[in-house]
Image: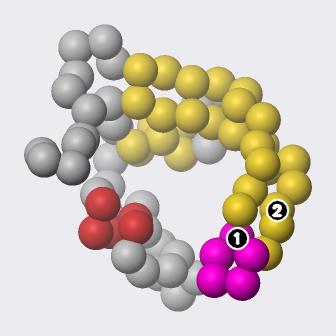
Amino acid sequence: WVWRFGVHSGRDTDKLQGLATHVSTTGSPILTGAPAWLDCRVETSMDTGDRIVSLAEVLDAHMEPATTPLTFKR
């Protein structure tokens, strides 16, 4: 998922195509099998030149208690 979501822009491709998802209470797609997720509403964004930083309100969240998070060594 890191390479699929973190390297390329989603402007020209559907990053969720072919992946199993379900819908959160707000209607956002959630990856099935994700160890944790946040469903947020973006309040404001700031263009810093080489990236955009967003401030968001968390509306819903879930974390699987028995999963091991992805780390630099894993």
- Residue 49: percent from left, percent from top: 72, 84
Q: Residue at x 41, y 30 (%)?
A: 36
Q: Residue at x 32, y 30 (%)?
A: 35
> SS class of the residue under badge 2?
strand
Which segment did they paint magenta?
A: 48-52
Residue 11 found in image quarter = bottom right
Q: Residue at x 52, y 76 (%)?
A: 10
Residue 70 found in image quarter = top left
Secondary structure mostly taken by the magenta-highlighted segment of the chain = loop
Q: Residue at x 41, y 21 (%)?
A: 63
Choose between 51 and 15: the one closer to the eye: 51
Disc 1 vs disc 2: Cβ atoms closer than 8 Å?
Answer: yes
- Residue 37: percent from left, percent from top: 48, 34
Counting the numbered discs, the total is: 2
Image: 67 above or below 73: above
Verify whether residue 40 appears in magenta: no
- Residue 29: percent from left, percent from top: 53, 45
Question: Could you tell me the amino acid type at mark 2?
Answer: Ser
Which badge, 1 or 2, is on the more N-terminal residue? 2
Find disc 1 in the rendering and name its residue: 52
In three-dimensional space, the C-alpha distance between marks 1 and 2, rounded to whole angstroms, equals: 7 Å
Rendering colour mode: secondary structure
Find disc 2 in the rendering and name its residue: 45
